[in-house]
Image (cartoon, rainbow, N blue to C red):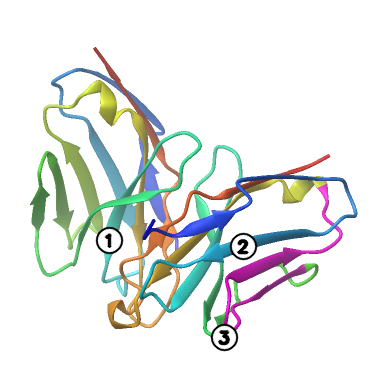
Amino acid sequence: NAGVMQNPRHLVRRRGQEARLRCSPMKGHSHVYWYRQLPEEGLKFMVYLQKENIIDESGMPKERFSAEFPKEGPSILRIQQVVRGDSAAYFCASSSGTAGGYEQYFGPGTRLTVT
Amino acid sequence: QQQVKQSPQSLIVQKGGIPIINCAYENTAFDYFPWYQQFPGKGPALLIAIRPDVSEKKEGRFTISFNKSAKQFSLHIMDSQPGDSATYFCAAKVPSGSRLTFGEGTQLTVNP
């Protein structure tokens, strides 16, 4: 599968727990973007990362949310002490370095439910 | 100024009809306007995209019309099919930025 991979596809967490969402970009892509989609809404940008660097995190909530893209392995979006308002679909997208972020290809998403 | 306004919110057409979805923007720095198609439970799929130096782009049954002076662009789906039933999102991007700014989405239903 050469597409963007995300896991888990569905994640249920109780309030106060931690959620870890993983994203493996398309083969050959080194740029990763995370977006959040609330029910019945469009996608909102959260963070843009390259290997070992956070380039733009202006869309990330200031507290409880963090992201990383290590030299080896997938990008991880981490949500600490989840609250009901964090329930949403979280999508990862990737692009190649030469595309300049213009052609972003999305994964299937992780649907987070906070109970 | 970073917003992209999309309309209508929902649209129902008969098979063979030509649904038209419209988007408007304010930020003249946007230089890339893609459309994404999303089926329930799936991620958005890049459908077609346009740059502001052309007024129209066609790919198969999908056409983007772009009006730079009006700061509007639209998606037309020719000979629509029930399989086109999905949510469609327009988006825009500035050259210096990384993020795509998305419209609110249009839920399209194509009846047989």
Q: Is residue A10 left or right of residue A34?
A: right
Say what amino acid the circle numbered 2 marks: Arg
* N-terminal label among 2 and 3: 2
Whether residue B49 is visible here, answered yes or no, is yes
State yes or no: residue B30 in magenta.
Answer: no
Same-subunit check for callouts 1 and 2: no
From mark 1 to mark 3, how far is it between C-alphas? 31 Å
Say what amino acid the circle numbered 1 marks: Phe
The reply to whether discs 2 and 3 touch (Cβ–Cβ < 8 Å) is no
Task: Tell me residue B72's x, y (percent).
Answer: 24, 54
Q: Is residue A47 left or right of residue B78?
A: right
From mark 1 to mark 2, how far is it between C-alphas? 28 Å
Q: Quadrant of residue B62?
A: top left
| Image quadrant occupied by the N terminus of chain B | bottom left
The residue lying at 57 percent from left, 85 percent from top is A71
| Residue nearer the viewer, B25 or B46 | B46
First to last magenta residue range: A65-83
Count of numbered circles on the image = 3
The residue lying at 54 percent from left, 43 percent from top is A41
Q: Which mark is residue A71?
A: 3
Q: Which mark is residue B33?
A: 1
Task: Tell me residue A44's x, y (percent).
Answer: 54, 58
